[in-house]
Image: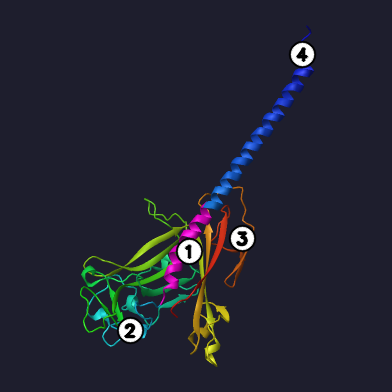
Amino acid sequence: MRGMSLVELMLSLTIGLVLIGGAITLYLESRQNVRVTDAVNEMQENARFALAMIEPDVALANFWGVHNWGTTIERRARDVEPLTKQVAIGNDCTDTWSIDLDVPLAGLNGLDPGWACLSADDYKAGTDVLLVRHADEDAVDAANIEPGKIYVRTDQSPRGILFVNAEPAGFGTQAENHVLETRAYYVRPYTFIRADGTKDGIPCLRRIVLADGGAAPRVEDDEVMSGVEDFQVQFGVDTDGIVSASDGAVNMYVDPDNPVLAQPGVRIRSVRLWLLVRADSFDVTYQDESHYRYANLDYTVDQRGDMPQGYRRLLVTQTVAMRNL
């Protein structure tokens, strides 16, 4: 038998190399597709989690238990005898920030709030801040009142009062106690500080909360979700009340600093939220060429100095209807 010639052997090797190369290419492309799919799924999951944290807070704004008349509640910030004259709230953002029930919902349009509880270095410039105040949904019996928490007691008169430690008397039989909740959502330009003192540069969504401080209430700062590059807010307003009776429908969406919000008769009917979520993994081959348009913003990544290339991004939005405003 003559066997194989050199030409036949080289041809066989070439065909084999082509087949092996194709298989390797297919494997690498499949692996890259899996990484991309995992990154997108992770961003979607993170976005859903963050929105699931914010949405109930926003929907409950101005809920005080039995009624939604915050201006009738005694010992609030603008009352003649605010609760802070009796109880010190540790690390509060202002003297009466936690108990300013006259403002159940507010926002800051890309501005550092300048609060004592939030350092300027911990606020990412250009992102919005959303402030929400309300009572917790669940009523608390007098026997279950815990020290270190602020409660709001309301009845159908409508009357209300803020208190700590002991349930106040003088209310109707339908009165209820609810824990006071004050929260502010914002974006920090980093998630954690390394051992050498440097910051990781991964932005994250956080919230400032009125919490149980043990013996006394205090304000704390919690992480909601890492990888959130931007947080924007707009209010859906019913402006019909300026000149006639309100019809309950949203006429337009405005930024939190729009002067129309201060006009008499204007009612906030909904809140629109945007989150720009960034993938955890860096891909040197990826260039984000998307054109982002939302909340009166219009930009590309290359036009921004605070958004590095090499990261996949996902923009999500949700509109929350207001129940108590």
* Distance in Å between CA atoms under marks 2 and 3: 56 Å
Find numbered disc 1 in the image and state the secondary structure of the residue it sits on. Answer: helix
> What percent of the width, then of the height, locates residue 47?
50, 59
Question: In the picture shown, does residue 316 fall above or below 115?
Answer: above
Of label 3 and label 1, which has the lower sequence position? 1
Instruction: Determine if the magenta segment contains residue 50.
Output: yes
Q: Dot 1 corresponds to which residue? A: 51
> What percent of the width, then of the height, locates residue 82?
27, 83
Q: At x 21% / y 81%, what residue is drawn?
A: 169
Of label 2 and label 3, which has the lower sequence position? 2
* Distance in Å between CA atoms under marks 2 and 4: 99 Å
Q: At x 46% / y 61%, what residue is drawn?
A: 50
Q: Dot 3 corresponds to which residue? A: 302
Q: Tag 4: residue type?
A: Met
Q: Tag 2: residue type?
A: Gln
* Distance in Å between CA atoms under marks 2 and 1: 33 Å
Q: Tag 1: residue type?
A: Leu
Q: Which is in the foreground here, disc 2 or disc 4?
A: 2
Q: Dot 2 corresponds to which residue? A: 156
Q: Which residues are magenta?
A: 42-61
Of label 2 and label 4, which has the lower sequence position? 4
- Quarter-of-image position of residue 84: bottom left
**Towards the viewer: 37 or 90:** 37
Q: Dot 4 corresponds to which residue? A: 4
Instruction: Determine if the magenta segment contains residue 178.
Output: no
Q: Inspect this view and state whether residue 146 appears.
A: no
> What percent of the width, then of the height, locates residue 26?
65, 37
* Distance in Å between CA atoms under marks 1 and 4: 68 Å
